[in-house]
Amino acid sequence: MPSDHRTLVQIDEYAASHFDRVSAIADALAAGECLIAESDHDALGYVVLNYVFFGFGFIPVIVVAAAHRRNGVGLRLLSEARYQCTSRKLFTSANASNVAAQALFARAGFARSGTIDNLDEGDPEFVYFTQCGRA
């Protein structure tokens, strides 16, 4: 929905300066890949779940609005993505510099599964994995 798009762009700080993220949010909404955490009709955060990673569930982005961080919203989003995942495995990733995301993935039960170099200069990408909830 267009109203969801506007709302998700507003809570996503990265989208404010990266038009490709604005476009990616629209694409994820159109494809039905966005799970949104809400309270009293306010968006608290969102997670994108797709199957572009070797046919397995993959979370390319998870965003929690700044005012709602460290309140369990990210854990609930990851839990719902894990439950909704229709493959046996669910993957996600975070830059080595993104220690907050790494801590969130660890709390959510994801195990580090590997490293990808050369995506962002000097900042390797750590890949995480867990089993899906329904597969």
Image: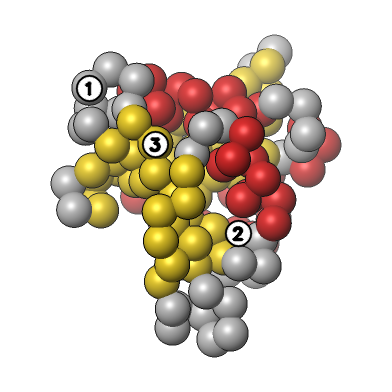
Q: CA distance from mark 3 to mark 2?
A: 27 Å
Quarter of the view holding residue 129: top left
Q: The disc labelled 2 sits on which kind of residue?
A: Ala
Q: Report the mark closest to the observer, 1 or 2.
A: 1
The residue that mark 3 highlights is 130
Q: The disc labelled 3 sits on which kind of residue?
A: Thr
Q: Across the whole image, how many numbered discs are drawn on residues? A: 3
Indicate left or right for 88 with 83 as reference.
left
The residue that mark 2 highlights is 15
Precedes in sequence: disc 3 or disc 2 = 2
Q: Report the mark closest to the observer, 3 or 2.
A: 3
Task: Please tell me whether mark 1 sits on a helix, a strand or a loop.
Answer: loop
Task: Please tell me whether mark 2 sits on a helix, a strand or a loop.
Answer: helix
- Image quarter of the C terminus: top left
Q: The disc labelled 1 sits on which kind of residue?
A: Ala
Q: 10 Å neighbourhood of mark 2: few (<14), some, or many (≥20)?
A: some
Task: Please tell me whether mark 3 sits on a helix, a strand or a loop.
Answer: strand
Q: Which mark is residue 135?
A: 1
Q: 10 Å neighbourhood of mark 3: few (<14), some, or many (≥20)?
A: some
Percent of width and height locating residue 56: 23, 43
